Amino acid sequence: MPPFPKGFEAKNKVAIIGAAHSQLGRRLERPTGALAVDACLAAIADAGLDVKDIDGVSNWPATDGQGVGPREGYNSAHVEWMVQGLGIEQVNWWQSGGGGNIASAVTTAMLAINSGICENVLVWRAMWQPRSGRGSGTRSAAELEAARTRPAPRVSDEAAYTAPYGIGGPGGFASSYMRYMKMYGAKRHHMAAYALAARHGGNNNPYSVFKDQILTYEDYMNARMIADPLCLFDCDMHVDGAAALVLTRADKVADMKQKPVYVTAYGSGGWDWRLRPPEEWQYASSGNIGRTLWAGTDMTPKDIQGCEFYDGYSPDIYWWLESMGFCGRGEAAEFIQNGMIERDGGLPVNTFGGNISEGRLHGMGHWVEAVLQVQGRADDKPGDGARQIKDVENMLVCTGMLAHGAGAILSKEPR
Amino acid sequence: MGAEQKPVPVATDEDRPYWEAVKEHKFVLHHCRTCGLYSSQPRIVCPKCHGEDFEWKAPSGRGKIHSYTIIYQTFTSGFEEDIPYIICHAAIDEEPTCYITANLLGVPEEDFDKLTIDLPVVIDFEDRPNGSTVPQWRLAK
């Protein structure tokens, strides 16, 4: 494998200058497109720009629809819809990623800006919670009855090897986590440290759907199992909502409204997880991100004041912490104990709640929080509790663990 | 109702030999004639040697548990009455990178905590009321 370029070209040349959320909630009446526009307009305003200043747009995934098919504007908001929805006259560059994660949309935006093809790129992710069936969080009596009487689904190709076994939802991650526990002796009570830390973040985050819901150690330990060892509070929370970022050329930031957040290191996953066993894929993907990220910078884990790690399921935190070099393999369960990952601990993680205690924005919530932390304004909005980490110079944000994920260090100063 | 709603595997032109063998309670896998790699699903190109010459070959049907879980909330039709049920990923003895994912049959919920990784398992076959047959894992005797 060729060595990862020492200091990729876009390093220090791109800055994030706007970050914002829309309203987040369970089954909101407001259409997904309207929520996405809310987040995008707020991020553009946050950057001190106007819609007409946006000349690049980047989004992921290319198609959406949460199993019921996309209805643009109603349950998804992709690139073409957003260009129309915002009334942008001309974009010089746009992309709508296929595989990967929102990290792919952010990092390709960095590369596009650095190439000179565009200056101000808008990146967003809009989520829609299915109203019925899988992912809805509830099934009506009528749906349950329909499920009992409909003909058996017929499945072929890859689905023929999984669906007839009742695999779905968190099954793969639960198996990975079970193997982790058996390999390294981790117990369920270890994970409570993460679930509680994330909830503390959510309780201090005005956008969190759990803002007013306290989670105790007893609540966590007594929670019902979804797929052992994953319990209810280990799973992400489906929501309606959107978040957005604005990225620009770092040499333009002197004139900008917000303090620039420099992208000072970048690591990439790139791994085909299909047909690979549970646990190995998580280590392989996050391991690639860790190796390439640290190869491209003189910084070390000691230079990081906090992390925003994608958490579709809570054990993701273990794989991230180990693969990014904060502790050894199999050590994360002990590492996170004794307040280590709380806001005032040695390495705060997911200060905003993560997917499990803010709501699932497919990683965009993680990027927004990392930006706010570097800018020092995580406590500034109405309703914000105490989330700001002290003296932040560098935050690490990692999203995407299945195929193409990415990690980046976001910094106050060029590094 | 119930188990009759479980998803029914439908063979494609490419994996018909797999499902036809399963119907006869035989277990075959896609096997690269060039380098000998077994794969859990048919390949077009071998990821190990880039060969394109495959055959359907019967491994021993023995394997070792790599990872597993027990499902308490199902999202798949027909499994509501099976809850809780086990999902088991096991590598076949012939090829440590070839994992077969199936249910682990014959382990009641109260014995779930006795399971661990690396336990030996064997392929068995389950004929379902909806007419489908699927390979399944059982603990080796």
Image (cartoon, coloured by chain):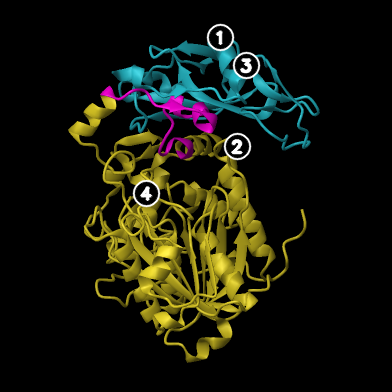
| Residue at 55% from the left image edge and 60% from the top image edge | A104
> What's the residue type where badge 2 is placed?
Arg
Q: Amino acid at mark 1?
A: His
Q: CA distance from mark 2 to mark 4?
A: 23 Å
Name the residue nearer the viewer: A187 or A171.
A171
- Per the image, the residue denoted by label 1 is B25
Q: Which residue is mark 4?
A: A236
Q: Which quarter of the figure is the C terminus of chain B placed in?
A: top right
Distance from disc 2 to disc 1, alpha carbons, whole Å, reads 25 Å
Q: Residue furthest left?
A: A141
For image coordinates 49% across by 81% down, the residue present is A260
**Which residues are drawn in magenta?**
A149-173
Same chain for the residues under marks 1 and 4 in the image: no
Q: Chain of mark 4?
A: A
Tag 2 secondary structure? loop
Res. B62 mark: 3
Local secondary structure at mark 1: loop
The chain that hosts pointer 3 is B
Q: Which chain is cyan?
A: B
Q: How far separated are the C-alphas under marks 3 and 4?
A: 36 Å
